Amino acid sequence: MRAVPEQGLCYNSALSSDAPGEPVRVTTTKNRAAMSTEPKKSQFSLLSERRFGPFFWTQFLGAGNDNLLKFAFTILVTYHAAVYGGGDPKTAAFWIGAIFIAPYVLFSATSGQLADKLEKAALIRLVKNLEIVIMLIAAGGFVMHQVLLLYAATFLMGLHSTIFGPVKYAYLPQHLREDELVGGNGLVEMGTFVSILIGTMVGGVLAAVEGSGPEWVAACCVAVAVAGRVVAGRIPDSPSSDPALKVNWNPFSETWNNLVLARGNRTVFLSMLGISWLWFFGATFLTSFSPFAKDVLGGNENVVTLLLAVFSVGIGVGSLFCEKLSGHKVEIGLVPFGSIGMTVFAADMYFATHAMHPDALIGVGTFLSHGASWRVLADLFLLAMFGGFYSVPLYALIQTRCEPAYRARIIAANNILNAFFMIASSLIAGAVLSAGFSIPQLFLLTAVLNAVVAVYIYTLVPEFLMRFLCWLLVHSIYRLNKEGLQNIPAEGPALITCNHVSFVDALIVTAGSPRPIRFVMDHNIFKVPVLSFIFRTSRAIPIAPARENAALLEKAYDDIAQALKEGDLVCIFPEGRITDTGDIYPFKNGVKRILDRTPVPVVPMALQGLWGSFFSRKDGRAMSKPFRRGVLSRIALRVAPEMAPQTVTPEGLQAIIQDLRGDWK
């Protein structure tokens, strides 16, 4: 790596004066608890609480029943086409998927309005009543071999899911704290795909029962619908977010209104597009499994079930790992990580099937006896797991960054986009296969498209890529221990102050903070490749000493004041330079000048363990020698309770950060 110019990340000597002051160690308790080492509860503890448990099992049973119906129908049409309409078994799965998704396009806008206007628990119970009626229709279709009834039931279950979708994701922020949202969303995503796994396995097994399979499927669909209604009766009340909302029953004009509303927040809208692309990607694989297993792998119905099981477990594992990897916060840095894995393993699915030459349909045991089969299963599991890394942070980001009053309508707009993308997936996949391409070639095409879409989205919203680089830093080079993060205000402005040890201090603080931070940076750092991209993306504030650029110095003060006025967190390194001794240099008076103009709480924090690292100035210039320590070196970020602005002096602040850092440099 090329050595960078020897400027610090924040040149606060430009803010300096020599005003004396005594050390002050006064903190406020407003909305803030003392630093605590109490471990966070596991996300699984939410399942035992009424605010989450009944809701979780209601959506779990609903998602399972959706897929029990669709998969049993798909299996019967694919392997018994003569009995069920005589359609093309190669494309039947895509048509079933398109019919299920069509209500999302037609009715998502209306369902979003209903979810914002009505009490959510009552609406959920109404939806579950509807599910029982739908499954009775489906039961008639299975028993009488009436494919039109089954297509009608598929459409109506799509309608059921359309109404439930906005309620589902608007319910969570009402009942979960922000630090529980990632875990809660992870459980919901895991539960959804585990229920898909169970639903598809049960649907596949029951549909294959010789002689009476359709009857068993019919009975199970109705039983699960009744169980879902019983569990929904325990969901606690969830007040309407906008009871005065006047419902627009015109689905076309309201769909347009919802999309316009969603576009009002650029990051949220692009996150919605990212989620919709995931549904395009996932739908291509899910709806391909039956013909893929039969025509490419040579597997019977049980092999189709195995593929869906592996895919579902992969999504579930990835969704659950998100809370651990994100540190109980909304970590959008996982999104690029997820998209990279999705591309790599989807592409390898194409190459893994080259050794497959089926002569006849085989069962799971024979399939697993072939070495090439394990590569296919590994690719499928890993691309699904990375899909979990990709989706959970995006859902949590949308929930936290859109206004509660129209959160359900934003979710509805997202469902509309999802539907368009899934229908497009079915139509494009059908067209590609009809044109003579193979299913493995379809997978390769999807992988290439995924890479193109990812690059496009991260170009539009560089924040995703910037957060990924920060996340990668603290999960590959370092192991970051975080203490006292609850002392960072959950909302509102604050001035963050920290000791300055290395060139990556700002990245470490960014990776540890539950909120975005705007850093005050030496203007020269914006000339350094990579670092310039990162800091411009994070809206860092450039600054220079008065002797170099007095106008830029004054503009920096104006920008800091404006950022604090807008409720942002702003971080400065009061030493004014990176240490070259390991000790903390005397703090300058820039903090006081900022606080005199904009009095806000001050949050002291200290970095530990970075002295002697590749990015520090120990034994000479930074980044000019090989890595001095091994990968995953231990470092720490410690945060003290906030200080009232009128109590802050440079000397007092330095004493607090010195004590916070201790002897570990």
Image (spheres, helix red, strand yellow):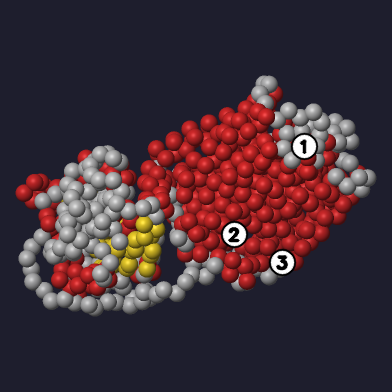
Circle nearer the viewer, 1 or 2: 1
Local SS, label 3: helix
Amino acid type of disc 3? Val
Residue 299, disc: 1
Q: Which quadrant of the view contains residue 51?
A: bottom right
The residue identified by callout 2 is 187
Q: Earlier in the sequence, mark 2 or mark 3?
A: 2
* Residue type beneath disc 2: Leu
Q: Earlier in the sequence, mark 3 or mark 1?
A: 3
How far across and down, in percent of the image, does residue 218 sit? Answer: 85, 51
Q: Amino acid at mark 1?
A: Gly
Structural distance between the alpha carbons of marks 2 and 3: 17 Å
Query: Foreground residue, 415 or 80?
Result: 80
Kindly identify the residue that appears in the image at 85 percent across and 33 percent down: 81
Quadrant of the rendered structure where residue 513 is? bottom left
Disc 3 from disc 1: Cα separation? 37 Å
Choose the circle earlier in sequence order: 1 or 2.
Answer: 2
Q: Which residue was labeled with disc 3?
A: 231
Binning the other alpha carbons within 10 Å of mark 2 as few (below 14), some (14 to 19) or many (20 upward) gives many
* Residue 264 falls left or right of residue 223: left
Disc 1 to disc 2, C-alpha distance: 32 Å
Outermost residue toward the top in this view: 435
Query: Could you tell whether 641 is left or right of 302 in the image?
Result: left
> Local crowd at mark 1 within 10 Å, few (<14), some, or many (≥20)?
many
Q: Check the picture and name the quadrant holding the N terminus.
A: top left
| Residue sitting at x 66%, y 61% | 123
Circle 2: element type:
helix
